[in-house]
Amino acid sequence: MVIAGVVTAALAGTNALTEGVIARRAEETENAARRQVIDADSFEKATLTDEGEEVVYYLAQKDGATVGYVFTTVTTGKSSGLTVMTGLDTAGTVTGVQVTADNETAGYVDKVVNGGLLDAMKGQNAPDGFVLGETVDGVSQATKTSRGIVSGVNLAVHYYETYLKGGDQG
């Protein structure tokens, strides 16, 4: 019992000493991912409420001005748990799309990325969302993954169009 108490105290002490460093590194990693979808110096966390659910997004700032927004959405492709990060500028144009986590069959996300779907949405303004097979082409042999990614981007576009368009925030 004494050994368990000493080990527990040591773990608690170590956690207290490293907690700030771990949090800072996690934030740096997340900001690096956000910079992949929009050119910004810093990101400010914000929230909005959509159908009773709180949605976290980030204001992308450059030289002290808001240049856009970053949304991270979770959708379903071939499997559930497809996490899509979407950058939108203040006019609603997609500045970038990244898949930050997935439970897809190995290689499916790579097929979609290499097939150009993410690049096809970049630079596009789709106020009503993207339609797979009409406004953007899916990737053969990865249709469900393509659909899931487009769904994630469309959710980000919905949040922008409904709550942030015209400079409204929150």
Image (cartoon, rainbow, N blue to C red):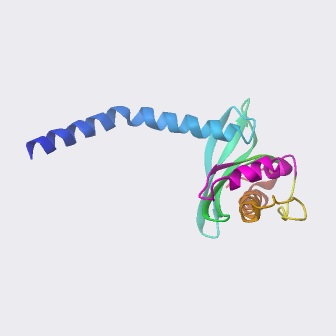
Q: Could you tell me which residue is drawn at 70 percent across and 40 percent down? A: 60
**Residue 76 appears left or right of 10:** right
- Residue farthest along the top direction in this orientation: 63
Query: In the picture, residue 157 is in which quadrant?
Result: bottom right
Q: Is residue 93 visible?
A: no
In magenta segment, residue 116: yes
Q: Could you tell me which residue is drawn at 62 percent across and 65 percent down? A: 79
Instruction: Give how far across and how far down residue 138 sits, in percent.
Output: 82, 60
Q: Could you tell me which residue is drawn at 46 percent across and 38 percent down? A: 23
In magenta segment, residue 18: no
From this view, report whether residue 130 is shown above or below residue 93: below
Number of numbered markers: 0
Instruction: Give how far across and how far down residue 83 sits, in percent.
Output: 63, 55
Residue 160 vs residue 125, the one in the foreground: 125
Quadrant including the C terminus: bottom right
Instruction: Give how far across and how far down residue 82 sits, in percent.
Output: 63, 58
Residue 107 vs residue 131, the one in the foreground: 107
- Residue farthest along the left direction in this orientation: 2
Magenta-tinted stretch: 99-124
- Residue farthest along the bottom direction in this orientation: 51
Residue 96 vs residue 101, the one in the foreground: 101
Q: Could you tell me which residue is drawn at 59 percent across and 40 percent down? A: 30
Q: Is residue 56 visible?
A: yes
Residue 147 vs residue 9, the one in the foreground: 147
